Image: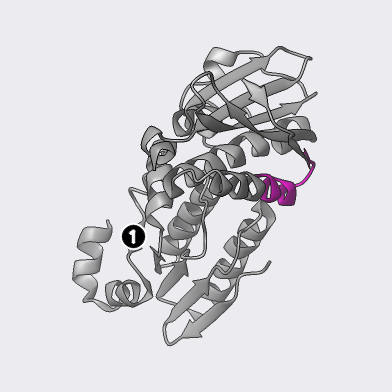
Amino acid sequence: MAVPILKQGPFLIATIQAALTDTDVLLLQDDVMAQVTRHRSRGIIVDVTALDVMDSFVSRSLQGIARMTRLRGAETVIVGIQPEVAFAMVQLGMAFEDVLTALDLEEGLALLTRPRKEATDSGG
Amino acid sequence: MADEPASVIPIESDADVVTARQQARAMASELELTSTDQTLLATAISEVARNITTYAVRGEVLLSVITDDLGRRGIKVVARDDGPGIENLELALQDGYTSGGGLGLGLPGARRLVHHFEIETAPGQGTTVTLVMWERENARAA
């Protein structure tokens, strides 16, 4: 199932709506990169609220999105990681140390729109 | 440990990996495992089932409800394949070791997520991983 990506001003919002196969995840990675390039986006939000499992593959792929887009000058924020999922990710060994996260879409947008200097300080 | 009828999920594609973990979660939910344990189990299954598609191409996941001597129930997951097997198991169980281009968190990660983890493998003889997630004591009393 493809993940819809909405353009909102300088940002992209990808909302995952159902369980993802590995193929879906790789597609999402490609789509995000293509759209970041096309729209010259400054930030990306990936909403994972609907995911009840984030295994090492999904986690690694989202981390990949964050790293790749950063190289294009865009910040990625992962929002909506469920508490049980966070628990499992830590047990698994995926702590997302270099990835920005926020509670929900609203806080994710707030993170992206805060003054740039602050973003550089805590994001780096 | 008496086994109730098992559900068998053939694993041949990445969509089957999703099916396996969803069925296991449904079973765990029926058993009233905590929501966290359901998630931990589903995540562990995702890891071991992906190993099947990555290394062995095809295999299967068997799910069953088991009961121990004290009447405690749990979900038993057997993920097995006739693939190449694992040459150095000790290495494969170490964090960060991978021969398949991943992060090397699959087996060691899955092991940390469940209550019981067992693996049987030998080069050329396939791999069988068994996972068990038990219901919590207080859940049974409630």
Instruction: Look at the image and tell me whether residue B104 can be seen.
Output: no
* Quadrant where the N terminus of chain B is found in the figure: top right
Number of numbered callouts drawn = 1
Q: Quadrant of residue B88?
A: top right
The residue under label 1 is which amino acid type? Leu
Colour convention: one colour
Instruction: Look at the image and tell me whether residue B126 can be seen.
Output: yes
The residue range painted magenta reads B10-20
Q: Please tell me whether residue B48 is drawn above or below residue A66 in the rendered image.
A: above
Q: Reply yes or no: does residue B40 show up in magenta.
A: no
Near-viewer residue (A93 or B114): B114
Viewed as shown, does residue B121 lie left or right of B10?
Answer: left
Viewed as shown, does residue B66 lie left or right of B97?
Answer: right
Q: What element carries label 1?
A: strand
* Quadrant where the C terminus of chain B is found in the figure: top left
Near-viewer residue (A41 or A2): A2
| Main secondary structure of the magenta stretch | helix
Residue indicated by mark 1: A100
Q: Position of residue A84 (x, y in %)?
A: 41, 50
Q: Position of residue A54 (x, y in %)?
A: 51, 50
The chain ID associated with circle 1 is A
Near-viewer residue (A95 or B101): A95
